[in-house]
Amino acid sequence: MIKEPLRSPNSTFIVRFWREWSAAAPRWRGHIVHVQSNAKATFMDIESMVEFVRRFGVMESRAYPGNATLNRKAGKGGNNEY
């Protein structure tokens, strides 16, 4: 019988968000680090951040509570809130 490699039951991530202003429109960007492996990624949307987290066995292919857009709802002035 082949045993699967053991994964730590804990994963720690450091996430940083910032807003960039441009002539076209302001946008949010982010950077994430998996502390145990020091793997890093940048992202421009929450779905890309979640995909990075899934690589480490967190939130394994399960649907989010609610819907696939992380319960996004329209906020005041057309902004999105998470």
Image: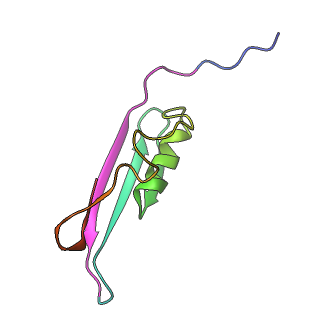
Question: At 24% from the left edge and 68% from the top edge, which residue is drawn?
Answer: 79
77 or 16: which is nearer to us?
Answer: 77
Question: At 56% from the left edge and 22% from the top edge, which residue is drawn?
Answer: 7
For the view shown, which residue lies furthest in the right direction?
A: 1
Q: How is the image coloured?
A: rainbow
Name the spot of residue 12 as percent of width and height, x first. 38, 33
Q: Is residue 12 magenta?
A: yes
- Residue 68 drawn above or below residue 23: above
- Residue 37 drawn above or below residue 5: below
- Which image quarter is the N terminus in? top right
Q: Is residue 70 magenta?
A: no
Which region of the structure is painted magenta?
A: 7-22
Name the spot of residue 61 as percent of width and height, x first. 57, 38
Question: At 24% from the left edge and 72% from the top edge, which residue is drawn?
Answer: 78
The reply, left or right, for residue 39 in relation to residue 12 is right
For the view shown, which residue lies furthest in the left direction?
A: 76
Name the spot of residue 65 as percent of width and height, x first. 40, 38
The reply, left or right, for residue 81 in relation to residue 5 is left
37 or 66: which is nearer to us?
Answer: 66
| Image label count | 0
Question: At 28% from the left edge and 53% from the top edge, which residue is drawn?
Answer: 82
* Quadrant of residue 73 within the rendered picture: bottom left
- Residue 62 drawn above or below residue 24: above
For the view shown, which residue lies furthest in the bottom direction?
A: 23
Name the spot of residue 75 as percent of width and height, x first. 21, 64
